[in-house]
Amino acid sequence: MRLAIVLTEGFADWECALLMATARTELGLDVLIATPGGTVVTSMGGLHITPHLPTKTLAPAEFDALVLCGGSTWETAAAPNLTATIRAFHAEDRVVAGICGATLALAASGILNEAGHTGNSAESLSAVAGYHGHEHYREQPQALRSGRLVTAAGTAPISFTAEIFHALGVGSEALDEYLSLYGKEHAAVQAAR
């Protein structure tokens, strides 16, 4: 199984890190990084990433999932137009996932207009031209899976990871328990308050 992870300049380090590490080390999946133009990108935290391929070469026949990582670029004019790629993956029934600002690209492609989804806020998606999925938006802290579409706010990288694996058909109770370990520190903080 192969996952294409799209990273842009200023991508959010934490949003796809657990997904990539778990996919490779726990599940033995192939993870390939794509960037606009195939250029090196730098994360919000200063990591320099050399991609495997440019986004323009992404083809649904070669991947089981297209995952768009969030970051600062998605809300700017520098955001790549991935509409054709997103629609192609969606039309071929591949998993398509976006977290944080990357949900704006999913909204622009039109695939959120008829499916349950979430994101950073309903307001941010409403500002996207071509987005008409208001009635399908769900305000929730966890990622949301609607068939083979997965969306999440930037604060939900753990459930985003889990929902992608379930959408791919490799999720399990044991995997959910493993991923829940990453949220235990937050439960302890909440309980102490």
Image (cartoon, grey):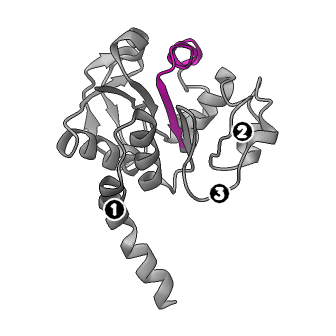
Say which of 41 and 7 sits in front.
7
User: In the rendered image of this protein, does residue 118 appear above or below residue 130?
Assistant: below
Question: Which label is found at residue 177?
Answer: 1
In which quadrant will I find the N terminus?
A: top left
Question: Which label is found at residue 189?
Answer: none
Precedes in sequence: disc 2 or disc 3: 2
Marks 3 and 1, how far apart in space? 21 Å
Looking at the rendering, which quadrant does residue 43 occupy? Answer: top left
Marks 1 and 2, how far apart in space? 32 Å
> Identity of the amino acid at label 3?
Gln
Which residue is at 39% across, 13% downward? 58
Helix, strand or loop at disc 1? helix
Residue behind mark 3? 140
Precedes in sequence: disc 1 or disc 2: 2
Residue behind mark 2? 125
Say which of 39 and 26 sits in front.
26
